Amino acid sequence: MKKIVIDLELLSEKDIEFKKEIDELIASDVAPKTQDMEDGKISVWDVLEPLGKKGLLGLMYPKELGGRGGSYFQEMLLSEALSYESLVYDMVRGSSVYPAGLIRAFRKEEALGKYVKPIITGEKKGCFCFTEPDAGSDLSRMKTFIERTKMVILYLTVKKDL
């Protein structure tokens, strides 16, 4: 297995244990499947779903939502280790968990158990899709906007070509 060299003296005991855990996990459960994943013989989700069951897809989410309540630094250790094995792993992990963050950010409490937990545990896959004519997926060129009225009615103005 490839090794990422980090000065362990800079890490807390908890972070050293976490790093050891993910190094072992990647060596035993991820690395042996990487070539098959990159060759298209297996799906990236064949590798990531088991990580979700261990609370590693949404590491920083609380345990009741399927994460571990991990630190930002632990998230970076995991991201670096997965990306070092294959950038695809961390890109897919991040893009799948992204919608869960939107749900939490907008305080949709009723959706936490229904949507967030299954995304964080890998049971369901999250996605965030956006396109517009003349913009494609370039958010900076999109023209969709919402207008609030005094009656608290939201009008969404958008053009969509399907």
Image (tube, rainbow, N blue to C red):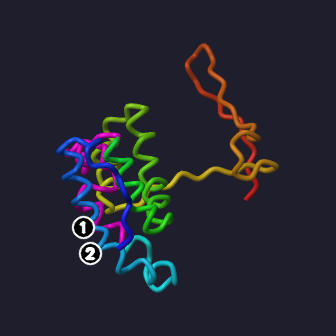
- Which of the two residues, 25 or 100, is positioned nearer the viewer here? 25
Q: Residues within 10 Å of mark 1 (few under 14, many from 20)?
A: few
Say whether residue 66 is left or right of residue 40: left
Rendered-image quadrant of the C terminus: bottom right
Which image quadrant for residue 73? top left
Q: Secondary structure at mark 2?
A: helix
Q: Residue furthest top?
A: 150
Residue 128, position as x, y percentages in the image: 54, 51
Residue 17 magenta-highlighted: no
| Residue identifier under label 2 | 28
> Looking at the rendered structure, which numbered label has been put on residue 24?
1
Amino acid type, label 1 = Glu
Residue positioned 42% across, 58% down in the render: 93
Q: Residue at x 57, y 16 (%)?
A: 151
Q: Is residue 49 above or below residue 106?
A: below
Total number of numbered discs in the rendering: 2
State left or right for residue 86 relative to residue 66.
right
Mark 2 touches mark 1? (CB < 8 Å): yes
Quadrant holding the N terminus:
bottom left
The range drawn in magenta is 47-72
- Res. 114 visible in picture: no
The reply to whether residue 14 is in sight is yes
- Give the residue drawn at x 29%, y 43%: 61
Q: Amino acid at mark 2?
A: Ser
The image quarter in which residue 10 lies: top left
In the rendered structure, the answer to whether residue 4 lies left or right of residue 61 reads right
**Depth check: 147 or 92 in front?**
92
User: Is the residue 8 above or below the residue 36 in the image?
Assistant: above
Q: Residue 112, image x and y in percent?
A: 31, 43
